[in-house]
Amino acid sequence: MAIPGSGLSRDEVLSQLDAMKAHDVRWRDGRAFTLAYNAGDEVVALAEEAYRRFSTENALNTDAFPSLRRVQADVVGIVGSWLEAGEDGAGFMTTGGTESILMAVKAARERGRAERGVTAPNVVLPTSAHAAFEKGCAYFGLESRRIAVRDDWRADPDAMADAVDENTVLLVGSAPQYPQGVVDPITEIAAIAAERDVNCHVDACMGGVTLTYLARLGHDIPAWNFSVPGVTSISVDLHKFGYTAKGASVIMHRSKRLRSFQTFVTDNWLGGFYGSSGVLGTKSGGAMAAAWAVLHHLGDEGYLRLTAAARRACDQLADAIEATPELRLRARPEATLLSFGASDPDALDVFAVADALWRRGWYLDRQGPPPSLHCTVNAVHDGRIDAFVADLRASIDEVLAARSTGDQGAYGTVE
């Protein structure tokens, strides 16, 4: 496509953009069980307005934009309190869970190199840990040592310990892990890391907000944050269950010394001193300001309310799946994520069920092995589960009658 010879009017541009969105999933109506999160029209509108006001401010240099220094400090401080980071905790905002995880991998590599002279570093992590760790290992030249999970889908600390050697710089646990929605045994994993004085990162991109408030609501939550000795860093996405605009995550370190291994500085060019806290240089202040706005607007009471709503919907959906003979819940959710497959995979193709649900306007993640459908349940789904379950039943009946099959699809795309 070539750029128009004469520019389009504002109305023409916006009209074409609106037309492009016509076939997107209706996430504002609670039709997406992945990718988008909704705390209500008022919160979405506030996030969009805060984003607009700071969209062209540049967080590369907060000397020029001290507002963004304040925004980041406030947001990181709030997240640190959720994580029990204490006075020594230190972190940065990033553009998402992937960047936070990349920075955790990079920091572990740099610490191993600086303190122990490690030149062939490896990461020991369960097969359930997020794909972004693979990305980090590929980008930064670390070996990924994937260890099979236990029958309950949780990490196996004994097997992980056996995989650790003198070149290990990082152990990983998740709270919760994404595929089946259960919390890894963080205490045991962190103890292995502490014994060997290496980094232990907890991927709480999905659970950092939710687990904090579920505990406040009286749920029995396994230990997972900085209260666990040996945990050195934690990632928390605010654009997920923080309900802020896309592009907002936090990576928190137990200390400024540990955080220092994340940063990059150089003066080896003709442009003077250059420092960067993450992958990006230039970074819009939009998502940062939106996060600050939503955190302050919702407050403690708002997050208690939204977390209760999301968990209520998740439990309702889990109960419905367990009551459906053709389906099998992979694990009882410990946060607000769940996955399910077919009781008899030879009789029912769950990817075909996903196709049928999409024709009815519902979008779910497809994953495997084993072939499963995944639901990230958030506050917008409270009150909508009955409608989804009715369409799920209809989709199952349609697939069984037609004996249709579907494709696994992809969690992320490259087109």
Image: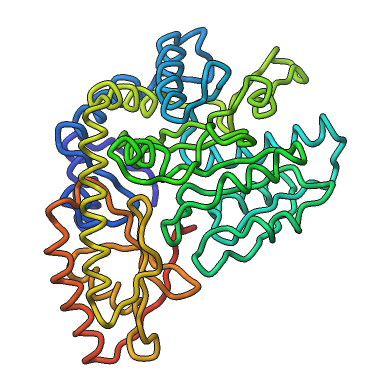
Q: Nearer the viewer, residue 353 or 89?
A: 89
In the displayed structure image, the side of residue 8 where residue 390 appears, left or right? left
Q: How many numbered marks does the figure carry?
A: 0
In the displayed structure, 311 sits above or below 333; it is: above
- When asked about the image quadrant of residue 298, the answer is top left
Q: Residue at x 67, y 23 (%)?
A: 260
Q: Is residue 24 visible?
A: no
* Depth order, front residue of 232/158: 158
Q: Is residue 194 above or below residue 135?
A: above
Picture layout, residue 232 above or below residue 379: above
Residue 18 screen position, x and y as percent: 19, 46
From this view, report whether residue 344 is shown above or below residue 193.
Answer: below
From the viewer's perspective, is 351 left or right of 227? left
Q: Quadrant of residue 274?
A: top right
Query: Which residue corresponds to the image point at 36% horizontal and 57% vertical from the top-left?
Result: 333
Q: Between 9 and 251, which is closer to the camera in this rendering? A: 251
In x, y percent, where is residue 266?
Answer: 73, 20
Please state if 186 lies on the left or on the right of 364 as rendered.
right
Please name the residue shown 68% across and 34% down the image.
107
Residue 232, quarter of the rendered image: top right
Q: Is residue 264 left or right of residue 401?
A: right
